[in-house]
Image: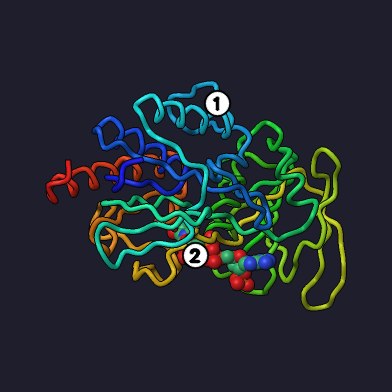
Amino acid sequence: MPDIERIVIIGSGPAGWTAAIYAARANLNPVVYLGVPKQNPAPVLPGGQLMLTTEVENFPGFPEGVTGPEMMAMFQKQAERFGTRVAGEDITACDFSSKPFTLTTSNGENIKTHAVIIATGATANWLGLENELRLAQIGGGVSACAVCDGTLPMFRDQPLAVVGGGDSALEEASYLTKFASKVYIIHRRDELRASKAMQQRIFDAENAEVLWNKIPIDVLGDEKIESVHLKDTQTGEESTLDVMGLFIAIGHTPTTNFLEGTGIELTDKGYIALNQRGSFTNIDGVFAAGDVADADYRQAITAAGMGCQAALDAERWLAAQGIE
Ligand code: NAP
């Protein structure tokens, strides 16, 4: 390890690995901190959200599809081919108050670096039901991303449900109405949070129905989901809804806890705020890419694109500082 790194990339999803590929090819000798696996309450793994995705069918270049874990292994292999170094730890704290920056690893080691790319992603929020997480992990018809998984053959012409009342839930539900026989939106209140335009789209869809004042309290099915057990939030009455797919869309949490006290500016939704079109944060020399800085798109391909931007921005910034 050099005394001072030129660039440290925190996070190993599509944004982190793409940044590494570009930084390594630019001879910046990057090191990627993969992150330690954890349970929160669904597994959080090095490789990010794609590690919990079965089939990826919308990433260009894979006409037959590819599994999320396979794709992340390929990204890593490509980054390592150009000399990217890999460290297994988490970065648990950052000090951006003086240059070079100091990053603390989960082993308690302090790393000095001139530039940092933060690509720690965001984790989908889950209800926290035991069978929900189990079925999500085994590809049993429970997912936190309809755009990723909704077109799988198992969901075609089947009754499906989406949980949530925000723009994501309604956008996902609207997307699913194109393939499903019926789409139920399970919402815990009697009013949706989503924009009026999005609501209208759902009200206009013949095969969509909002189930008001309901929360799932259990997901039933061994290998595949068969039904959802619901509870009425007003009356407490319980009911069963037969569905072949359940999509959880109750928001995401960006992974920024290790940035506490650093002065990094966050948006009102808790994502890293970026300046202009690029990957510049409010701190000179700190760049961000992928879902940790993107509340809207959250796709592997957009995260990869942002990773590319961050590496190019960092490369130019390092050159401007005279750090080659
Ligand atoms: P969100 O706006 O925070 O909505 C989350 C929804 O999940 C809310 O309806 C909430 O219910 C519900 N919810 C939260 N926790 C729950 C729980 N434990 N059990 C049951 N329901 C729960 O999140 P989002 O929809 O992901 O949107 C995030 C941001 O991205 C928003 O600003 C949104 O406008 C934006 N976005 C925009 C677009 C677009 O413009 N095309 C698309 C997607 C997202 P309550 O309403 O009762 O709180």
Q: Which residue is label 1 attached to? A: 65
Tell me if 233 is positioned left or right of 100 in this view. Answer: right
Q: Earlier in the sequence, mark 1 or mark 2?
A: 1
Tell me if 231 is positioned left or right of 187 in this view. Answer: right
Question: Which residue sits at x=66%, y=46%?
Answer: 143
Q: Is residue 29 above or below residue 102?
A: above
Question: Which residue sits at x=84%, y=58%?
Answer: 229
Q: Residue furthest bottom?
A: 234
Q: Give the residue type that dot 1 points to.
A: Gly
Residue 167 rendering spot, x and y as whole percentages: 52, 61
Residue 311 visible, this orientation: yes
Tell me if 241 is positioned left or right of 167 in this view. Answer: right
Q: Nearer the viewer, residue 172 or 298?
A: 298
Disc sitting over residue 257 in the figure: 2
Viewer-side label of 1, 2: 2
Q: Is residue 292 above or below residue 69?
A: below
Displayed quadrant of residue 273: bottom left
**Quarter, ligand 1:** bottom right
Residue 256 rendering spot, x and y as whole percentages: 46, 62
